[in-house]
Image (cartoon, helix red, strand yellow):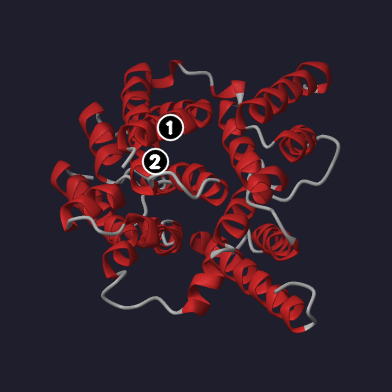
Amino acid sequence: MSTASTWLLFLAIGLGTFLLRFLFIYLFGKIEMPVELRRALRFVPAAALAALVFPALTHPAGYLDISMQNFRLLAGLGGAVVAWKTRNVLLTILVGMILLWALESALGV
Amino acid sequence: MPTNKDFFAGMRGAFPILIGVIPFAMISGVAAVSVGLTFFETVGISVIVFAGASQLAVYQLISAGSPWIIMVLTAWVINFRFTMYSAALAPHLQKLQTWQKALLAYMLSDQAFGVSMSHFAANEKVSHRWYYFGAALTIWIAWQISAVIGALLGALVPASWGFDFAFPLSFMALMFAALYDRPTVMAALTGGSIAVLAKGLPYNIGLVLAISLGIAVGYFVESLLRRNGVIQ
């Protein structure tokens, strides 16, 4: 890929991504947000975060792997218990990473 | 208006999640160099796009020699979730000038959104825009510095350490903080399950589908509980 087309690619992606981020912050107040939409938006964090988390545990290598060899799934379930009990980001990362490294060094190939 | 206090509170709120941000940004810097981008191109895409998942997808497509239209569309689809974050954040970022809104929108990230929204849910009285600005700016700076370091280190960062796993772990803690009643739990279970089932769909469209269905189910469950008088 030539240098010029590389930068054009970045600008196209960047401009589109900026508009996706900016659109509703900008439109708010110009178009009154319906109460029903606001009700629906309450569920965005839960639905979006779960949609990012679940596949990262079940598809660590890009394909579905529900087995005892999927260390990220096992370590993630351990991390989930910590997240549930403490809601602490740092502690969840710490326990999850230690579990992953422990599983890999004990059982990994 | 306790602006400074809330700005620094936002910075502090973002600190724990940097453990996930920093390695991910470094990995994305390493990945960019590994597919043949120069140092300046790597820094360039990191500043212009500032959306890690879509950047990683683009690097993979560059190495596969995909046409640029596929790269652009893939990145846009992966980043479509920002419209939902943007709409949810909008009420908190009003009474600002357009350039200020544009700046805050540019800095929007999964992490800034997660940290801010879970904080707002529990703390009504903070200045939301200043808290968000503090959190988003902290994450942006950490991301850019780490991406530069990653680009410089090249292949020296050992991917085998699996530090990218800190990402889903940090999302997990934020997710549990966002579960405070039955409808939000149902939204998360639906969003997560659909994301797993739709993982194979092209262009990461499964992610957008999963989030949309998760919201729909949460909304439906809430309506059902209201109708039956379980909640008000």
Identity, as a three-letter code, of the amino acid under mark 1: Ala
Q: Is residue B205 left or right of residue B34?
A: right
Q: Is residue A50 left or right of residue B205?
A: right
Any part of residue A23 in sight: yes
**Crowding at mark 1 (Cα within 10 Å: few <14, some 14-19, many 20+):** some
Looking at the image, residue B199 lies above or below residue B226: above
Residue beneath label 1, please?
B9
Looking at the image, residue B1 lies above or below residue A20: above
Q: Dot 1 falls on which chain?
A: B
Marks 1 & 2 on one chain:
yes
Kindly identify the residue that appears in the image at 64 percent across and 53 percent down.
A50
Kindly identify the residue that appears in the image at 34 percent across and 29 percent down.
B33
Mark 2: secondary structure: helix
Cα separation, mark 1 vs mark 2, equals: 6 Å
Q: Quadrant of residue B168?
A: top right
Residue B95 locus on image (x, y percent): 25, 58
Residue beneath label 2, please?
B131
User: Which one is earlier in the sequence, the residue at label 1 or at label 2?
Assistant: 1
